[in-house]
Image (cartoon, helix red, strand yellow):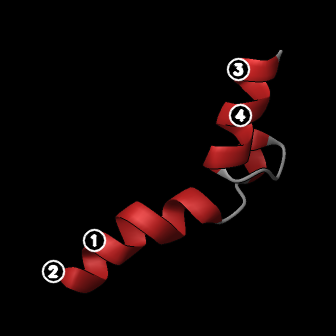
Amino acid sequence: REIFEFIEVFYNRQRMHSYLGYLSPVEFEAAAKAA
């Protein structure tokens, strides 16, 4: 359970996603707010 939470909360929000232009979800969200 703790490993799953780590993956969901930290890893998936930090790793780059190709469909977000290789930005992490956090970076993509920040860029969208700034636009």
Q: Which residue: 29% across, 84% down?
A: 3
Q: What is the three-letter code of the residue carrying label 4?
A: Ala
Quadrant, the N terminus: bottom left
* Residue 19: quadrant of the picture: top right
- Asked if the residue at tag 3 contacts the one at tag 4, i.e. Cβ–Cβ closer than 8 Å, the answer is yes
Residue 31: image location, x then y, percent: 79, 30
| Mark 2 nearby-residue class (10 Å; few <14, some 14–19, many ≥20) | few
Q: Mark 4 points at which residue?
A: 30
Q: Which element carries disc 2, helix, strand or loop? A: loop
Q: Name the residue under label 2.
A: 1
Q: Mark 3 points at which residue?
A: 33
Q: What is the three-letter code of the residue carrying label 2?
A: Arg
In the image, which disc is placed on residue 5?
1
On screen, 31 above or below 8? Answer: above
- Asked if the residue at tag 2 contacts the one at tag 1, i.e. Cβ–Cβ closer than 8 Å, the answer is yes
On screen, 20 above or below 9? Answer: above
Q: What is the three-letter code of the residue carrying label 1?
A: Glu
Residue lying at the far top in this picture: please name it. Answer: 35
In the image, which disc is placed on residue 15?
none
- Asked if the residue at tag 3 contacts the one at tag 1, i.e. Cβ–Cβ closer than 8 Å, the answer is no
On screen, 33 above or below 8? Answer: above
State how far apart marks 1 and 4 are (Cα). 23 Å
Q: Which element carries disc 3, helix, strand or loop? A: helix
Q: Compare marks 1 and 3 and give the one earlier in the sequence.
A: 1
Q: What is the three-letter code of the residue carrying label 3?
A: Lys
| Mark 4 nearby-residue class (10 Å; few <14, some 14–19, many ≥20) | few
State how far apart marks 1 and 3 are (Cα). 26 Å
State how far apart marks 4 and 3 are (Cα). 5 Å
